Image (spheres, rainbow, N blue to C red):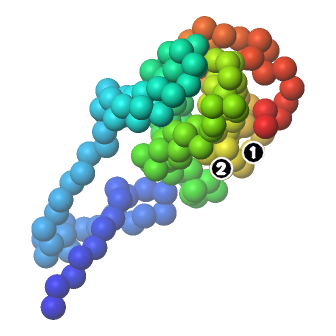
Amino acid sequence: VSFIGAMGPPGAGRPHVTNRYQRHFNLVFVLNFEAESMVRIFSSIMQWFLSKFPSQVSSLGQSVVKATVDIFESMTTNMLPTPAKSHYTFNLRDLSKVHQGICLCTKNSLPTSDDLIKCWAHECQRVFEDRLVNGEDHAWFNNKLKEVMEARFKKQWKQVVKVEPLI
């Protein structure tokens, strides 16, 4: 009889497993990707997808990926799970969902670079902000989104987003 199990690190409702119990198992540790690795992986995907768009839009592929990784790292660092917010666990799947959402766009739906930036912001809100439970966390996220937009796209929120909600 063979058993296979998986577990995350203790915390957020997950109990500590004693060494006495762990000695019965072979342990394999998997580390998270570094930001550089995530940028490289998702840049390849975005570059390929945006290659059929106008150059004004396709030139933002690298910025979209870096901005998404910035948001993802901020969420995993600052929005940690607690007993009241146990669903605040973010992983590579969330990062992937933002890019998948962008990749569902058509050439007609993203005619300008501002449209791509709005789509990116909407996808980040859909994947990350929709999980947040209180006004304080929503305000923090919106400030972070605006900060990353200014840093990565060199655009102010009000320049790009004329009407809210985005979509």
Foreground pick, 86 / 34: 34
Compared with 102, 29 (above or below) is: below
Label 2 sits on a secondary structure element that is helix
Give coordinates of residue 138: x percent, y percent. 72, 37
**Relative horizontal placement of residue 162, taking residue 61 as reference (left or right):** right
Quarter location, residue 140: top right
**Relative horizontal placement of residue 13, taking residue 85 as reference (left or right):** left
Give me the residue at 67% from left, 18% from top.
112
**Where is mark 2, residue-wise?**
131
Say which amino acid is labelled 1: Asn
Outermost residue, top side = 154
Q: Residues within 10 Å of mark 1 (few under 14, many from 20)?
A: few
Q: Residues within 10 Å of mark 2 (few under 14, many from 20)?
A: some
Give me the residue at 15% from left, 91% from top.
1
Which mark is in front, 1 or 2? 2
Give me the residue at 53% from left, 44% from top.
100
In whole angstroms, how far apart are the C-alphas of marks 1 and 2? 10 Å
Give coordinates of residue 129: x percent, y percent. 67, 41
Q: Is residue 18 visible?
A: yes
Give me the residue at 21% from left, 82% from top.
3
Foreground pick, 134 / 150: 150
Foreground pick, 164 / 43: 43
Outermost residue, bottom side = 1
Label 1 sits on a secondary structure element that is loop
